[in-house]
């Protein structure tokens, strides 16, 4: 599940099972926190198996069984600290939800003093978010139904001047409708400007209004599919230009073992064969053409597996790369000189350690699981 899908299913979870996070979950969340801190300058911590801030104060809210949480904190002198905690924190919360964990932002109903000991001098604590195995686990349909029933603001309340706005603006607003906020206030508005930009304004002040604004900005960006926000109430959003590529995890079987085809691009990174979609092409057609051009191999594309990786290749551009699985059906293997330095077949383990980007490694993992089940 990608983060855009998670927005459709996430609701706050307030009751947790005592099961500890698995080592894989801890590792993945730890990695996400490290990356978040590098990008944002925040000092977010992942705290595991420490129920104290939620255990002692029985009268505090309705949270039960919380043992794991993110502590959202950062430099006390950062003028945008709260908004950044909301923006980057929501990415972490959705990442945890994508792993099947329950989550809940918590600003008031926990023992704040207990969390202060994780901080260093000069840092300020903004709030926390509980995470763990949810007591009740529903399927996707049930989760969507629950998320839809929530009493959130209408798009007419959240958006201003939207009559001539493009569809990406309304998709952004639809995503903001599903943004969590303290006491479910959603005290902000998004304005479509006729010069093609968007501004987000706080419409009511309360203790967590700027955290809420940061969360809402993150949701808008996900729904609008990429762009860049300026911090602050009234901050401007510039929509990113969209690019699309398609490719495939190409596999074959040799002596009972699956092997994967990787290409070392001239830029130096190891990845799957893939390339730009041309006008009039369908996704599978692009994948087939690009594999043939880059590796000389004809392939049968299996669209039953489809994963999208989204990233910003340069400022102002957002790129989707759609991957299928494929197996060779003919052709003569050779690397396309202009773009590819070398190609080769590797076992799953070898491929995992060669692949340069973590997002491609996730695709390989998912493709390997898919092929094992086929
Ligand atoms: C900044 C912030 C602080 C919050 N503080 C609390 C809290 O102290 N206790 C609590 O039970 N829920 C808290 N929540 C969760 C909200 O009540 C919840 O997100 C909102 O009601 C919307 O529901 P949803 O998350 O299911 O969409 C907080 C949410 C945010 C964003």
Image: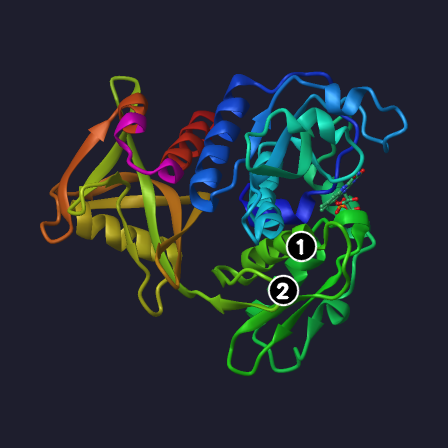
Label the magenta part by its dominant secondary structure.
helix
Distance between the Cα atoms at labels 2 and 1? 8 Å
The disc placed on residue 233 is 2
Image position of 52 (left or right of 215) = right
**Label 2 vs 1, first from the N-terminus:** 1
Residue denoted by label 1: 210
Residue sitting at x 67%, y 27%: 115
Which residues lie in the magenta part? 352-360
Instruction: In the rendered view, tell whether residue 65 sits above or below residue 305.
Output: above
Instruction: In the rendered view, tell whether residue 3 sits above or below residue 162.
Output: above
Name the quarter showing ligand 1. Answer: top right
Q: Could you say where residue 247 lies in the image, as x and y percent from the top left?
A: 32, 48
Q: Could you say where residue 299 lies in the image, as x and y percent from the top left?
A: 27, 44
Q: Could you say where residue 29 lies in the image, as x and y percent from the top left?
A: 52, 30
Residue 257: name its quadrant: top left
Residue farthest along the left direction in this orientation: 337
Image position of 330 (left or right of 22) = left
Residue sitting at x 74%, y 24%: 53
């Amino acid at each position: 599940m990608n983060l855009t899908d998670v927005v459709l299913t996430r609701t706050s979870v307030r009751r947790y099972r005592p099961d500890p996070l698995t080592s894989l979950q801890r590792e993945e969340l730890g990695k996400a926190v490290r990356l978040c801190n590098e990008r944002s300058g925040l000092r977010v911590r992942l705290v595991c198996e420490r129920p104290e801030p939620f255990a002692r104060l029985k009268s505090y809210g309705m949270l039960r069984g919380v043992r794991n949480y993110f502590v959202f904190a950062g430099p006390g002198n950062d003028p945008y600290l709260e908004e950044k905690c909301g923006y980057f924190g929501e990415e972490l919360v959705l990442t945890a939800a994508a792993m099947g964990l329950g989550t809940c932002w918590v600003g008031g109903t926990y023992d704040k003093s207990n969390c202060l000991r994780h901080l260093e001098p000069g840092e300020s604590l903004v709030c926390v978010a509980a995470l763990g195995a949810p007591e009740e686990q529903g399927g996707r349909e049930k989760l969507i139904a629950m998320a839809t029933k929530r009493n959130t603001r209408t798009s007419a309340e959240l958006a201003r001047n939207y009559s001539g706005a493009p569809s990406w603006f309304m998709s952004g607003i639809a995503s903001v409708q599903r943004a969590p906020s303290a006491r479910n206030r959603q005290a902000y508005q998004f304005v479509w400007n006729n010069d093609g930009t968007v501004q987000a304004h706080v419409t009511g002040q309360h203790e967590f209004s700027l955290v809420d604004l940061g969360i809402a900005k993150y949701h808008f960006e996900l729904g609008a599919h990429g762009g860049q926000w300026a911090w602050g109430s009234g901050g401007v959003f510039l929509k990113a230009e969209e690019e699309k590529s398609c490719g495939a995890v190409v596999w074959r079987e040799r002596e009972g073992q699956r092997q994967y085809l990787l290409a070392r691009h001239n830029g130096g990174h190891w990845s799957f064969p893939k390339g730009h979609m041309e006008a009039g092409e369908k996704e599978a057609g692009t994948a087939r053409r690009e594999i043939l051009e880059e590796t000389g191999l004809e392939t049968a594309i299996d669209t039953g597996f489809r994963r999208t990786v989204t990233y910003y290749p340069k400022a102002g551009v957002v790129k989707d790369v759609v991957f299928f699985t494929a197996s060779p059906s003919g052709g003569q293997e050779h690397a396309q000189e202009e773009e590819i330095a070398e190609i080769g077949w590797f076992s799953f383990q070898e491929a995992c350690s060669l692949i340069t980007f973590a997002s491609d490694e996730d695709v390989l993992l998912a493709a390997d699981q898919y092929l094992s089940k086929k």
